[in-house]
Amino acid sequence: MNAISKEDLIPFNLVARMGYPVAVDHAYAKASHPENVFGQIYHPDANLWGHIDMVALTVLAAQKLHKEYEWTLVIKDCLRPVEAQQKIMETDIVQANPHWLVEPKFLSSPGQGGHPRGMAIDIAAQDKFGQAVDFGTAFDSFSGDAHPEKNPAHRNYPYSSEQVKENRARLDNAMLEAAQKMGRNLLLLSTEWWDFRFPSDEIGHLSPIEDRHLEDWQKIMTAPAKIPEQQERRMASMLTNLLQKFDYS
């Protein structure tokens, strides 16, 4: 496997400070978060990181949605190191729901999938008033049955309201259009309306990221050091330069 360069990781916290229409709601870093079904997974001061390609794609989609509907994309999770995946597997709720680990899976085994590569992202949105856009369920609303007629979070759930269907279509189309502009394929996980990822056949050759191998200021599982200013400038420049390659106005 090929290692993912630590230099290619960007924090969405920085992206938000750069003025792009994204907000960070690091669900697994907050034990009391109403949508966090697993409890405390990340350090509460951790930044929310992603691979630069997924970050750029998300920014492109966010700009389209903000221009057309005045939405702001709310990032719930992206990079989920191997240690975090293992910690989730050990939680009581996962132990009590073994069907979550059977195809079609709600969770990937440690090291598997896009999250430990920073190449899967969980997204919601808020409107111009700061209110949550209605997507039918909350983020991480896991069903007892993954069948599309029994799982309200399924992208093909037939009983969603017309408004929910429209909101989901807006989000999906914006992400797919951004992926097309970047020349990337994007997988929309069928069982979770909030999940977008690069396909496994395109990223499976890349090694999953372990928190212990990150720089101190990149760490998610333990208290992170402050990001050095020169690193913030470098990352901001990288993202700006990448976005300038695309017509995203």
Image (cartoon, rainbow, N blue to C red):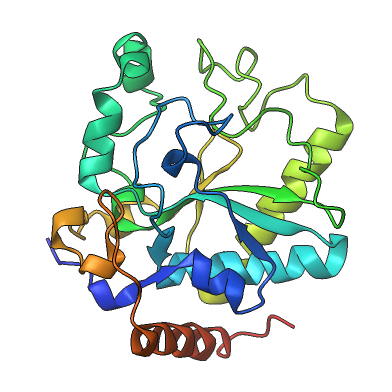
Q: Is residue 133 above or below residue 98?
A: below
Q: Is residue 12 left or right of residue 161?
A: left
Residue at 58%, 41% in the rendered image: 194
Q: Quadrant of residue 223?
A: bottom left
Q: Quadrant of residue 219?
A: bottom left
Q: At which x and y percent is residue 104?
A: 41, 24
Q: At which x and y percent is residue 24?
A: 57, 56
**Between residues 73 and 169, which one lies in front from this camera angle?**
73
Residue at 64%, 30% in the rendered image: 138
Q: Is residue 56 left or right of residue 82?
A: right
Q: Is residue 87 above or below residue 212?
A: above
**Between residues 145 and 77, which one lies in front from this camera angle?**
77
Q: Is residue 8 above or below residue 113?
A: below
Q: Is residue 13 left or right of residue 59?
A: left
Residue at 82%, 70% in the rendered image: 67
Q: Is residue 147 above or below residue 184?
A: above
Is residue 104 something that shows in the picture? yes
How many marks are shown on the rendered structure?
Answer: 0
